[in-house]
Image (tube, helix red, strand yellow):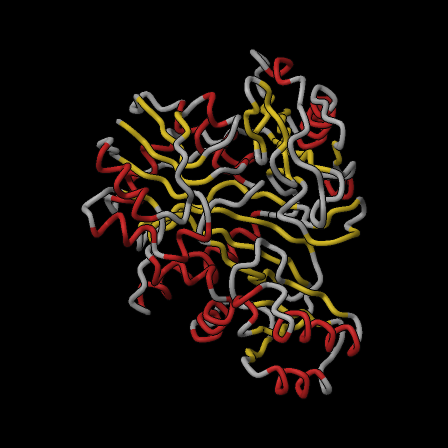
Amino acid sequence: MKVLIVGSGGREHAIAWSVAKSPKVTKIYCAPGNAGIAEYAECVNIGAMEFDKLVAFAKENEIDLTIIGMDDPLVGGVVDAFEAEGLRVFGPRKNAAILEGSKAFSKDLMKKYNIPTAAYENFDDPQKALEYLETAKFPIVLKADGLALGKGVLICNTLEEAKAGVQEIMLDKKFGDSGNTMVIEEFMTGREVSVLSFVDGKTIKTMTSAQDHKRAGDGDTGLNTGGMGTFSPSPFYTKEVEDFCNKYVYQATVDAMAAEGRPFTGIIFFGLMLTADGPKVLEYNARFGDPEAQVVLPRMKNDIIEVIEACLEGKLDEVDLQFEDNAAVCVVLASEGYPVKYEKGIPISGFENFKDKDGYYCFHAGTKFDGDQIVTNGGRVLGITAKGSDLKEARKNAYAATEWISFSNKYMRHDIGKAIDEA
């Protein structure tokens, strides 16, 4: 079987690593890929949004399965483009990817189908948003409706901050057209948990839990990023929480999408907040999380190709999805200055330290080749992942492994998974 993976980050590297383990796979391509993915796949210089070129490549090279890793192409309708040419592709169609593509849509869906979430209002008129804020309780959350690289969310503690946030999102268009509509949402407190799932349109099978760290600095300070590290499983995701979500969140979401004429096949990522009033949905994503994939996939026992095929054939109910009884922690090595301004093209050394080391992984997020040398090519550069018998051991192993890699503007948080100590 020949497989094409679309994307270029740490998530796609984790997917490529997982796909490479399948005995069904004879050849992997990745568009556009990165220096780490090149170990498993032939990287092809086609951008994730170049649908015509991707489709043409898949046809010319007789690709048996294409896996879409990224949100932008999914929301843009890449799956529809592949299906129109009779090609086998894994991911939601455009009308289902709206679950991530529009926060206003997903909030309205949850309200309509009684899926627990924070109270909210949607606005497409900045003046009306400002008027609403005059009577609101603080802190409060402002969200750009569309995709914003995980950064279109502002937590405002005062009316002045919120007014500035409306200016930033809706008037200054900091996040482009994503800010044409804005969601104003009640501020929830509690532990955050991420739960990824496979979906075949009607059946859902959840994966092991994880927790991301979005802020750039230690102690959850600084700007929001795409994710500075993660751990799996979450000790706060108890059997009680799982039972509640199975009953009121997971299947309910899949059924709601089907009822709306938007059947969802692919990956649904549930961002949950464990509040004093019970678990509530913070957000949905329509693909693997990044860096959640880097800690979830190494713990998955199943052949990922078999699970994906079951999703595409509507036979997910026949799959026994299993995960190892251990833990994993991923620490992101970023470029100093991320997510604002940072240098690229800096040589990286130390990759050989990961060779033949079981349970240690170096997933590439923002790298490229400069001749034979691998250099930095993004804000998040590498995801250093390690497994352990429990979370504390996995955390110790991951931080030890961060020392094996060197580049001159290397930056990381030092408290990824620190919440484990409080569990």
Give the camera-side residue of 238 and 418: 418
Residue 280 shows up from this direction: yes
Give the camera-side residue of 276 and 85: 85
Quadrant for the C terminus, please.
Answer: top right
Percent x, y of residue 140 = 71, 72
Q: Height in image: 137 above or below 317?
A: below
Give the camera-side residue of 175 and 271: 175
Residue 230 shows up from this direction: no
Q: Height in image: 202 above or below 35?
A: below
Question: Is residue 186 left or right of 283 when viewed as pictured?
Answer: right
Q: Height in image: 174 above or below 302?
A: below
Q: Residue at x 69, y 22 (%)?
A: 405
Percent x, y of residue 204 = 38, 50
Give the camera-side residue of 39 and 392: 39
Q: Residue at x 39, y 25 (%)?
A: 42
Percent x, y of residue 99 = 44, 62
Question: Is residue 62 left or right of 254 when viewed as pictured?
Answer: left
Percent x, y of residue 349 = 67, 19
Question: Is residue 418 left or right of 297 when viewed as pictured?
Answer: right
| Residue 63 lies in quadrant | top left
Q: Residue at x 49, y 37 (%)?
A: 8
Quadrant for the N terminus, please.
Answer: top left
